[in-house]
Each structure stands twice: as C-alpha cells, then as structure tokens.
Image (spheres, rainbow, N blue to C red):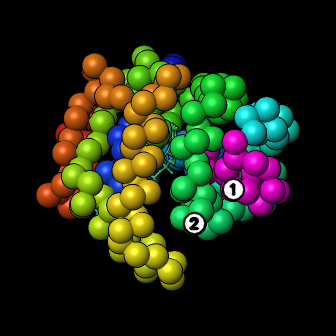
C-alpha cells in the first residue's frame, strides 16, 4: 500500500507546525518540519562563520551535512538543535539560504525519501506545489501579518528570547517576500490545496477543519 502524504504550506506564523503536529498524533503518522531543515543549514553556516552571500561555500557545506528527525527532535550532524535554529539571527538569514536551488534540491531529495519510507504530514512552503505534487491532501494556511507576528512574538517571548514585535513583523514580511519571489519552487498555493484563513480561528478550530477533510 502507498504511504499517505499530507502537505501543509503557507507563510510564517500561519499555524502550520502546531496544527501538523496535532494532526500527526491523531493519525499516528510522522510529522516533518521542512522549515527546520533549512533553518539547520542556516544555523550551521552562521555557527561556522560561512558567509551567507557565498553560495558556493553554502552548497559545499550542505552536501557534507547530515539532517535527521527522530522523536520530534531535529539532528544536525547527530546533534539536537531544536532551540538553536529558532533565533532571530537564523530567521533573518534562512530565506536567503533557502533560495539556492542546489540546497533546495538536497533538502527535497531527503523529504521525498521520508515520504517514501513512511506516511507523513509535512509542512513548509513548497510541499504541495513541488515536493509532493501528488500528495493525498494539501492545505494552504494563511493569516493576516499582524496576527502571525503577534503569535510568533508571544511564542518566542515565552521561551525567553529578547525580542520586540516590530522586529518580528519585519522578519516575517522580509521572509514572505523572498520566499514568494524566488525563482525555484517559491511559496505558492497549489491549485488543488484547500486554503484556510486562520486569522480568527484558534488551534482547535483549524485542527477540526482539517480533520473534516481528512475523514
Ligand atoms: O516557522 P516559520 O514559519 O517561521 O518558518 P519555517 O517553516 O521554520 O521556515 C523557515 C524558512 O525556511 C522559510 O521562511 C523559508 O525561507 C524556508 N523554507 C523553504 O524555503 N521551504 C520549505 N519547504 C520550508 C521552509
Ligand atoms: O509553523 P508556522 O510558522 O506556520 O506557525 P506555528 O509555529 O505553528 O504557530 C505560531 C504560533 O501561533 C504558535 O505559538 C501557535 O501556538 C500559535 N497559533 C495560534 O495561536 N493560533 C492558531 N490558529 C495557530 C497557531
């Protein structure tokens, strides 16, 4: 029997990872956060002093990098980096790294392998439009920029990050812009994706909408 693939795409703060995690538990399938993969590569570049504008160096590094998911942890070269990849410094550089075609191809190959090995719910920017065009179900989550920034602000603040709301708004606007304008596999709603505006919906409401489609 073929594995089930559910794609969840959309801009930052739309609620993709929160909702995907809950749905993965309900269905007892794996959750893959593809944004964490691009974040891990970006974190490694910053940590190792690689110039974010040096595409060749970034590609060479990515080729030699191992990324894995186990028990809801992300491993970068066998080290858990769940927290390190969520800083504003990684957020501020990740879209630049993620627009490099060769780096995307390495990540996409890994993502497709995961979808072949087991059933997955995968969230990102290009899952329904590029990585798994034939996914069983595709969702595109959106929300207004102020609400998305507010959610991310509350989340990072609770984790003890020193941040202000304006910086988050600017980071998200900047990433939305680069992610949707890049030439290779940009952020776009797939024609056959179900679009859900989550601006005034709480997590339970969005989960319940999605579970209705899955049933
Ligand atoms: O969690 P948040 O929505 O802030 O972002 P993320 O899902 O962790 O993704 C971080 C960045 O990775 C995005 O802004 C994109 O630049 C890139 N990304 C991508 O290009 N393609 C994906 N499938 C997932 C993320
Ligand atoms: O993955 P993505 O960037 O799309 O968003 P997320 O990380 O799942 O959600 C960002 C924050 O918004 C989390 O702290 C969620 O708990 C919160 N959230 C919310 O308050 N209401 C929703 N309908 C969805 C998410």
User: According to the image, label 2 marks what residue?
Assistant: 87
| Residue 115 horizontal side relative to residue 52, left or right | left
The answer to whether residue 172 is visible is: yes
Q: Position of residue 102 (x, y in %)?
A: 69, 26
- Classify 48 as above or below 155: above
Q: Secondary structure at mark 1?
A: helix
Q: Is residue 39 magenta?
A: yes
**Residue 91 pos. (x, y %):** 54, 56
- Tell me which residue sits at (24%, 31%) in the image: 194
Which quadrant of the figure has residue 135? top left
Position of 7 relative to 94 (above/below): above
Tell me whether circle 1 and circle 2 mark residues in contact (CB < 8 Å): yes
| Residue range of the region highlighted in magenta in the rendering | 38-53
Q: Residue at x 59, y 51 (%)?
A: 93
Residue under circle 1?
43
As for residue 109 lying within the magenta part, the answer is no
């Amino acid at each position: 029997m073929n594995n089930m693939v559910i794609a969840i795409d959309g801009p930052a703060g739309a609620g993709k990872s929160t909702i995907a995690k809950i749905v993965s538990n309900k269905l007892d399938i794996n959750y893959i956060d593809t944004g964490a993969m691009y974040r891990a590569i970006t974190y490694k570049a910053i940590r190792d002093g690689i110039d974010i504008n040096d595409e060749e160096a970034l590609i060479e590094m990515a080729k030699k990098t191992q990324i894995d998911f186990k028990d809801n942890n992300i491993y970068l070269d066998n080290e858990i980096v769940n927290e390190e990849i969520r800083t504003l410094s990684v957020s501020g550089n990740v879209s630049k790294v993620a627009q490099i075609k060769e780096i995307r191809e390495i990540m996409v190959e890994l993502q497709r392998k995961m979808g072949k090995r087991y059933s997955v719910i995968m969230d990102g920017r290009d899952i329904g439009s590029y990585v798994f065009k034939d996914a069983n179900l595709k969702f595109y989550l959106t929300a207004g920029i102020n609400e998305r920034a507010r959610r991310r602000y509350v989340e990072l603040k609770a984790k003890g990050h020193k941040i202000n709301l304006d910086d988050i708004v600017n980071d998200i606007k900047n990433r939305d812009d680069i992610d949707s304008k890049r030439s290779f596999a940009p952020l776009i709603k797939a024609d056959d994706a179900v679009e859900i505006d989550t601006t005034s919906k709480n997590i339970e409401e969005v989960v319940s909408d999605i579970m209705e489609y899955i049933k």
